[in-house]
Amino acid sequence: MSRSKKSGRFGIIDLGSNSVRLVVYAGAQRNPVPVFNEKVMCGLGRSLASTGRLDPKGMERALAAMRRFVALREQIGIDELVVAATAAVRDAEDGAEFVKKAEGICGFPFMILSGKDEARFAAQGVLSGTPDAEGIVGDLGGGSLELVTVGGGKMGEGATLPLGPLRLMDLSKGNLTLAETIVEKELKGLDWLKRLEGQRFYAVGGVWRNLARIHMAQRKYPIHVLHHYSMPASEAAEISRVIEKLGPKTLGQIPDVSERRIDALPYGALVLDKILAATKAKEVIVSAYGLREGVLFDRLEAEEKAKHPLIAGAHDLAGRLARFPEHGDEFFDWTAPLFAKDLLGENEEEARLRLAGCILADIGWYVHPDYRAHHAMTEIMLAPFSGIDHPGRIFLARVGYHRHEGRGEPDLLGDLTGMMNEKENSRALVLGLALRLAFTLCGATTGLLPRTRLSVSKNFVTLTLDRKDEALTGEVVEKRLNALARSLGRKGEVKIK
């Protein structure tokens, strides 16, 4: 990989109570794409509650990890590197001494985050990945739990509680019954939680992601993307109560549980169960975005912050894979008549999904023709996008499939039709067939589509071309125009003006 491709990379070392992690992003941009991610489970805060000090072995492991991460800085080409230290470091008697040693390794000062800082960055991270988030953000680290309300793109009330699994294990001496009493006491002091009954709970943190993986496995859920994975609160609470009762040996036999999270999982499940009971939340949504993404978002220019993460992510992927990344705007304008108010119609979110589908329409061009449809579908389904829920992912994936395959049902990930309603399945088919026609008509190049026009009447879908472009029509163009027209219950016709 050339040096020019490395430029602009942003790295953050998350110095947490349980782990030390280096994440390197392709750049400080609206859709942060991780290009390197490494975590070392150090357990810095393992004995903090009982001793007031950082774990000695944990410090050794953490400092060794820092040496490696700093050595990787030049190798990877990280332009900007920040270190954010959280609960264990700020609360420990010897935290300042440890930071002095660690800063000596890195050669620059750290961000020692207060509880308020942690809560703010966690909420900001969730909002950066889910701009329309409405409810409560909960970020569960090894040493603390941050709770913050979000809505309208802004943060509200918040609190930091000493309820991280490592700290709970230490405070309760490994007794879950005692841990339950501690959690209930801490949550009881937050009167504002009661005013948020029935809202969504946005779960951040590795322990809760593991819980979501178990839920996915139980449901045989086909899309293994954790970001914006949704669980009914009743099911999340039920699975939490089951996990609370399981011992380490049993938990270790569950394929979807990380071996490094086994000890912490029952305590994290307990905390989630009690939060859901206190808030009477209706839904738990997993956010892969949290503190690290919040720190990155804080550094963006205002213009970059104003972008929608899905559209920024689609442009980024198309910029890497499509022949003409700028094609997206042409396709969006050209397909607009199919989604007019008196036809299929679309709201703001649906228009944004259509734009993303247009931007991504060419990302499978380089694959063997027999595999393009499935490749485009899976590439879109599993891409590191944010600003989109799972039904939205399926919509875009189906658009990518139909753009290459036409009609028919994809079987690579199983039958996904039931995960969208009939209207959305129809919209995906229409957009996919329209893009299929567009690529055939313009020969996968830019500049021609704006000279043509689609229109829809009661009985026809009409493709209108200038006389000078008449020769560009032909059997295949007419075949694909007819396929599009049939999807709208009409006939296709070509008009030359």
Image (spheres, rainbow, N blue to C red):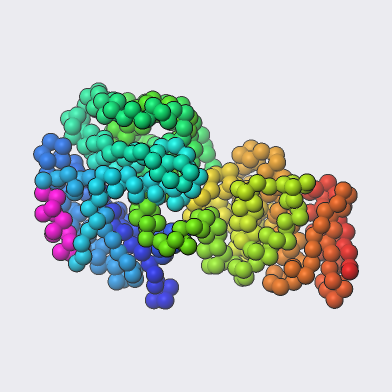
Q: Residue at x 60, y 60 (%)?
A: 360
252 versus 452 height, above or below: above
Residue 410 visible, this angle: no
Rendering coords of residue 212 (x, y %): 43, 38
* Residue 481 placement: quadrant: bottom right
Residue drawn where x is 25% and y is 67% of the image: 71
Please state if 152 lies on the left or on the right of 404 as rendered: left
Q: Residue at x 34, y 47 (%)?
A: 120
Q: Give the prevailing secondary structure in the magenta stretch.
A: helix
Quadrant in which residue 77 is drawn: bottom left
Q: Nearer the viewer, residue 94 or 20?
A: 94
Q: Quadrant of the N terminus?
A: bottom left
What percent of the width, then of the height, locates residue 202?
Answer: 42, 39
The number of numbered discs placed on residues in the rendered structure image is: 0
Viewer-nearest residue: 212 or 427? 427
Seen in the image, is 374 located left or right of residue 185? right
Q: Which residues are magenta?
A: 94-106
Asked if the stretch drawn in magenta spans residue 249, the answer is no
| Residue 95 falls within the magenta-colored stretch | yes
